[in-house]
Image: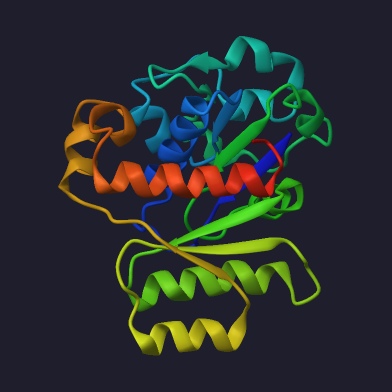
Amino acid sequence: MKIILIANLAGGVGKTTLAHSIATAASEYGKKTLAIDADPDASLTFLAGIENPRLTLAEVANEPGKNEAAIVKTIDRFSLIPSASRLIELERISDKFKEAISGYELVIIDSPSGPNRILPQLLSIADRVLAPVDGSMLSIRGALHIRRFLGSENKLKFDLITNKKVNDLGLNQIKSDLEFVETEIRFDEKVHLAQFANHSVLTAYPDSDFASDVRELTYSLLEDFSLI
């Protein structure tokens, strides 16, 4: 099992869209995929067509035995541990949680924006971090905060996912602070159209530029993890 954490302390940079899309793409490639909505805003849960789930990460984080009852199968074919606003009260995740989800080949975690209690634990169980950046200095700052939080000695691979051309000033700032892999995803209006229908863009608009870029990124991740 490999775990990818989608993280940026800035909000509105595309974390949930990326998590939803990679989970869909991995499922298309035949991988047993679990997405975890670790954001109290529950945007990924909503995009998956789920409202007011009875069991969420808030209930199963410290009682991993409830995972089986909490996990739902989405229309985009990946499994999901949903979220709800009560997740904001979650202070820790059981040490046994990673073991409890080990039946999956790939786990995608959509993390909350801003500092929160469980982010250090999510980082500690991740095999890779993807930080979406939308070209704004606030999104770059949010990505830098994540990387600095990891510390200079941490060897966790860190990928910067841009959805616009980041200006040279922004890239130079990031390059001076960290090593990263940059991947550009071409966002377009089809992302929003698909979300209105509670579908992944890959399902609703499979031939779009966005879908093509996410499939390429996902295939590369699966290759790096020796899952394909």
- Label total for image: 0
Name the residue nearer the viewer: 68 or 179: 179
- Give the quarter of the image for residue 108: top right
Where is residue 63? Give x, y as percent: 75, 22
Could you tell me which residue is drawn at 55 percent across and 84 percent down? 175
Check the picture and name the quadrant holding the N terminus: top right
Q: Is residue 173 left or right of residue 202?
A: right
Note whether residue 58 is visible. Answer: yes
Q: Is residue 33 left or right of residue 161?
A: right
Note whether residue 42 is visible. Answer: no
Residue 3, above or below 113: above
Could you tell me which residue is drawn at 62 percent across and 35 percent down? 107
Name the residue nearer the viewer: 71 or 186: 186
- Give the quarter of the image for residue 116: bottom right
Q: Is residue 23 left or right of residue 207?
A: right
Could you tell me which residue is drawn at 72 percent across and 26 percent down? 101
Where is residue 77? Give x, y as percent: 46, 19
Residue 21, above or below 53: below
Q: Please identify the residue farthest to the top as the structure is shown.
A: 69
Give the color scheme: rainbow, by chain, secondary structure or one colour.
rainbow
Where is residue 139? Give x, y as percent: 40, 69
Residue 109, above or below 180: above
Check the picture and name the quadrant holding the C terminus: top right
Where is residue 117? Give x, y as percent: 65, 51
Name the residue nearer the viewer: 10 or 18: 18
